[in-house]
Amino acid sequence: MTFDRLPKIAPSILSADFADFGRECEAIEAEGADWVHVDVMDGHFVPNITFGPPLVRAIRRHIRTVMDVHLMIAPVDPYIGAFADAGADVITAHAEAGPHLDRTLQAIRAAGCKAGVALNPATPAEAIAHVMDRIDLVCVMTVNPGFGGQSFIPAMVPKVARLREMIGDRPIHIEIDGGVTPETAPLVVAAGADVLVAGSAVFKGGSVGRPGPYGANIRAIREAATAACRSHAA
Ligand code: DX5
Ligand code: ZN
């Protein structure tokens, strides 16, 4: 994985057909996905359950790009090895998932993955102040985690800007997760985000048999994001 701050679109397979994950991953990649975002939920840290390491391992064969695994589970440490072995490139744990975030982040890197930390909406940017040298990505939750299709929380935009200031020149991605659309993407990209997770906004209107809408949806988000990136830089 090389580092850059160009806007990247990471479709979340939470909005895919759960009976056809392999072909869904291939379809979104063929239609222009930069990363594939994989949401793991445990029914404890969040009020929903998705899947675990065996499913992640099974879909790895269908993904050529970065597999970005978002763990909404607590505890998280006992499962890091299993998700790394399953083929995750990035493993993101929640700052709220346990009392030992620094240890968790060390364990993710020790397992050979890029380390991400996700912040729930009520968690301040400063939660990462003392782990900056241990992270490759910070994921700003712009909805409360657990479900796709929720509305973007605009109060998160200043948090993105604060994180961007804190990060400075460090090679740390700012990822946005929740309610990303062509309308909300420019707000967060202008504030400094570079990885945009999108579930419902990518998968709406398409299917594995008719993936064209996936491509159109990805392009719409990318165009809105890239325009905001340019106007930010100007
Ligand atoms: C929410 C998940 C998200 C979700 C986003 O808990 O972490 O990745 O799939 O879905 P949308 O883009 O529909 O808000
Ligand atoms: Zn997610």
Image (cartoon, rainbow, N blue to C red):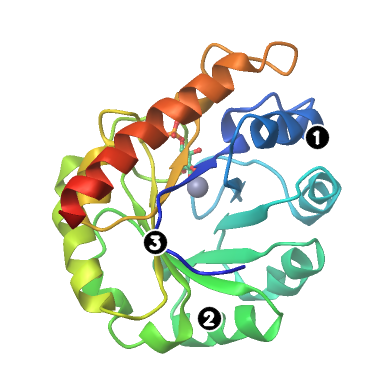
Looking at the image, which is closer to me, 203 or 2?
Answer: 2
Residue type marked 1 = Gly
Q: Are marks 1 and 3 in contact (CB under 8 Å)?
A: no
Q: Is residue 29 above or below residue 192?
A: above
Disc number for residue 5? 3
Q: What is the x, y in percent for residue 211?
A: 66, 17
Q: Farthest residue in the front direction?
A: 234
Q: What is the x, y in percent for residue 72?
A: 53, 55
Query: What residue does disc 2 label?
Result: 105
Residue type marked 2 = Leu
Helix, strand or loop at label 2? It is: helix
Of discs 2 and 3, which sits in the foreground? 3
Looking at the image, which is closer to me, 171 or 91?
Answer: 171
* Residue 72 in view (yes/no): no
57 left or right of 231? right
Residue type marked 3 = Arg
Looking at the image, which is closer to me, 16 or 218?
Answer: 218
